[in-house]
Image: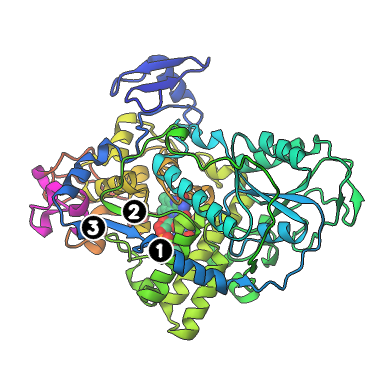
């Protein structure tokens, strides 16, 4: 029933029950949810087109605005410019052909969330320990299924489109270096053993992941590979650089014949600071960010980038490299982004955005002052979609910041980008320490409290129909573009959790569907913080909408951009439009909103203090 505006709710025995939108839950389900709220699995209405009906009015609005005001390409460069910039950066971070290959036979590079050529240790180690590298990408159907608790699409159409662009770009860049990208649809644990057998590959190299779904796939791939009978192959495998914590079963190196199947060699690669360089074990990670950041900054060094060889070929021979899929083949359809930010996927676009933000526009030098903005593309770096898909290495970003500091200016702003990237590292390492608890209702601290799963309230939040312009504008931006500012994310998270009292996982899963930059560690890490169930008990915040509106959108420019009906109002009325806008779905928990129907509530001292 994907794509239809009806609601399927699963009930215990696996049967599906159709309900018309807005009708109450059936008694059996209501009872089950009441008894066991954390386990109930619901499916909500969702469109397969992500620029959905909720954004229809915004798109219509786009028609009546000047072109320059409605769409921001990120980066704002054409394909030719992007290629030129990427080529230049690739030159800087590639090695002149002095590296020697030390291995034998064929190896596979299984691309996961590391869709790049530069500073890709997986690709480099695979190349240097073989004679032939076969790059493979598996389109795992599970990535296009439903989210865990609430049955939203696991990958919305906008992120799927971004992924398609990343794959096209990766394929082009690999071809330029003498390789290609083999693309298959199916589960990696089925595809990789079969390809390894066909090509006689002795090792599969891949980037290590940290969350349970990805770890499960790693386990099954390893098992599948062990069952493959390889002909006797002489391998001379270089194991340098892979920490023992990562590779569970390192095989003896040097020229032995392989009786067991090919092995899986996992390499750390997603963070700015390498896991092996941390001054503490991940199970002893401090629970307070500052207590993590300070020792890391003072005791660790960000490693140098792995310079990519200019020529990685030859590629193994095959007539069937497979194709980058279309959205339709993935069962999705896209409405063009016409308003807000339109991101381009791929490493070339990522490197071009770095060039644009740092070198062309000098925005790095003012980042700290602008980073809480919401309008346009340039208030913050917008690196996150490329970081999440691995088109961009955080280490390369660090090197570029250092180069900028040397060649232009070093100030609070240049440092602050690194400060934020350390947050990203922190959430990644926390996912190792806390495992699956980051996905659970009580979070890492196993907090017990009662949450509602009111579907009607949730739909108003998700579709941007709460009656609070700041919430509605942000939610419309999310469904229209796949992006929301950091400020916006904190505000809508606080509203869902504190004002609506809804189960935070509903919000987190909706973000999982929509965000171009979705990353399980950053997403669930931030949501657990926002919901007050994260590892740090002090991170328990209420974001007051009137205060946030006044501070971050005083002219109502942002809300008017996304909610056309507010444009006609005087600027000081746009956040508090009274009867000129839809009625508020519920009163705010703390404080009243000017011009509305006298919503007032009383807050405790503790809550008052944590208000922002
Ligand atoms: C509820 C919630 C959910 C979030 N979900 C995600 C997610 O799924 N994926 C994701 O990448 N970020 C997530 N974030 C963090 C943050 O909002 C985005 O990284 C940021 O808005 C991306 O925009 P930018 O690249 O312009 O960031 P900038 O402000 O330019 O920061 C530079 C980089 O630092 C990192 N960073 C900044 N803030 C954070 C943070 N709070 N946590 C982790 N990394 C950070 C990002 O990689 C970002 O690209 C979430 C935040 C909240 C409050």
Q: Which residue is mark 2?
A: 342
- As measured in the structure, the alpha-carbon distance from the residue carrying label 3 to the one carrying label 1 is 40 Å
Q: Magenta part of the protein: which range?
A: 557-580
Residue 333 or 15: which is nearer the viewer?
333
Name the residue at 52% across, 47% down.
520
Residue 170 or 606: which is nearer the viewer?
170
Rendered-image quadrant of the N terminus: top left
Q: Which residue is mark 1?
A: 80
Badge 1 crowding class, 10 Å Cα cut-off, few under 14, some 14 to 19, many 20 or more, is: few
Name the residue at 51% across, 64% down.
421
Mark with earlier residue (2, 3) = 2
Q: Are marks 2 and 3 in contact (CB under 8 Å)?
A: no
Q: Is residue 40 above or below residue 547?
A: above
Residue 61 location (% of width, % of height): 17, 47
Q: Which mark is residue 363?
A: none
Q: Are marks 3 and 1 in contact (CB under 8 Å)?
A: no
Name the residue at 81% across, 63% down.
102
Image quadrant of ligand 1 equals bottom left
Residue 59 location (% of width, % of height): 22, 44
| Secondary structure beneath label 3 | helix
Q: Is residue 555 above or below residue 261?
A: below
- Label 2 vs label 3, nearer the camera: 2
Q: Which mark is residue 549?
A: 3
Mark with earlier residue (3, 1) = 1
Q: Is residue 171 above or below residue 144?
A: below
């Amino acid at each position: 029933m994907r794509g239809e505006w009806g609601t399927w709710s699963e009930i215990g025995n696996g049967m599906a029950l159709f309900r018309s939108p807005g009708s109450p839950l059936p008694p059996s389900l209501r009872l089950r949810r009441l008894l066991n709220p954390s386990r109930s699995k619901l499916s909500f209405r969702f469109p397969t087109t992500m620029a959905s009906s909720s954004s229809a009015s915004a798109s219509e609005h786009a028609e009546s605005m000047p072109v320059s005001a409605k769409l921001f390409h990120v980066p704002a460069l054409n394909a030719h410019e992007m290629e030129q910039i990427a080529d230049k950066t690739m030159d800087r971070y590639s090695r002149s052909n002095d590296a020697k290959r030390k291995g034998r036979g064929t190896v596979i590079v299984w691309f996961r969330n590391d869709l790049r050529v530069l500073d890709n240790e997986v690709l480099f180690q695979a190349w240097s320990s073989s004679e032939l590298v076969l790059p493979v990408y598996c389109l795992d159907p599970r990535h296009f299924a439903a989210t865990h608790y609430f049955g939203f699409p696991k990958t919305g159409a906008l992120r799927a489109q971004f992924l398609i662009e990343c794959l096209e770009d990766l394929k082009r860049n690999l071809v330029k270096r003498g390789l290609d990208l083999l693309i298959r649809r199916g589960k990696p644990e089925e595809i990789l053993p079969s390809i390894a057998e066909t090509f006689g590959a002795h090792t599969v190299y891949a980037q290590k992941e940290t969350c349970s779904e990805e770890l499960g796939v790693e386990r099954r791939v390893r098992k599948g590979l062990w069952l493959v009978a390889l002909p006797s192959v002489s391998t001379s495998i270089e194991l340098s650089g892979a920490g023992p914590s990562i590779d569970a079963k390192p095989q003896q190196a040097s020229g032995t014949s392989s009786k067991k199947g090919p092995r899986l060699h996992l390499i750390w690669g997603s963070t700015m600071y390498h896991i092996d360089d941390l001054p503490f074990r991940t199970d002893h990670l401090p629970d307070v960010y500052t207590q993590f950041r300070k020792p890391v900054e003072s005791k660790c060094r960000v490693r140098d980038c792995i310079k990519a060889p200019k020529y990685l070929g030859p590629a193994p021979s095959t007539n069937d490299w497979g194709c980058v899929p279309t959205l339709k083949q993935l069962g999705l359809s896209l409405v063009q982004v016409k308003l807000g930010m339109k991101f381009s996927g791929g490493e070339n676009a990522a490197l071009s955005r770095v060039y644009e933000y740092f070198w062309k526009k000098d925005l790095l030098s003012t980042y700290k002052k602008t980073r809480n903005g919401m309008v346009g593309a340039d208030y913050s770096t917008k690196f996150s979609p490329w970081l999440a898909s691995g088109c961009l290495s955080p280490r390369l970003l660090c090197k570029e910041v250092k180069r900028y500091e040397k060649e232009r200016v070093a100030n609070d702003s240049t440092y602050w980008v690194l400060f934020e990237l350390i947050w990203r590292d922190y959430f990644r390492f926390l996912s190792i320490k806390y495992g699956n608890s980051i996905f659970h209702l009580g979070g890492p601290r196993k907090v017990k409290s009662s949450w509602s799963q009111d579907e009607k309230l949730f739909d108003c939040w998700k579709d941007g129909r709460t009656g609070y312009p700041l919430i509605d504008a942000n939610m419309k931006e999310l469904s229209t573009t796949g992006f929301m500012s950091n400020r916006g994310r904190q505000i809508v998270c606080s509203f869902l959790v504190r004002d609506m009292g809804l189960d935070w996982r509903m919000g987190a899963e909706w973000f999982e569907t929509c965000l171009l930059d979705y990353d399980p560690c950053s997403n669930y890490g931030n949501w657990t913080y926002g919901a007050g169930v994260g590892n740090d008990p002090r991170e328990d915040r209420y974001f007051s909408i009137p205060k946030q509106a006044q501070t971050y959108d005083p002219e109502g420019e942002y809300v008017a951009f996304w909610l056309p009906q507010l444009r006609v109002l005087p600027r000081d009325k746009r956040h508090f439009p009274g009867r000129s806008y839809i009625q508020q779905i519920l009163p705010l928990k703390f404080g009243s909103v000017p011009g509305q129907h006298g919503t007032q509530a009383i807050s405790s001292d503790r809550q008052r203090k944590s208000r922002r």
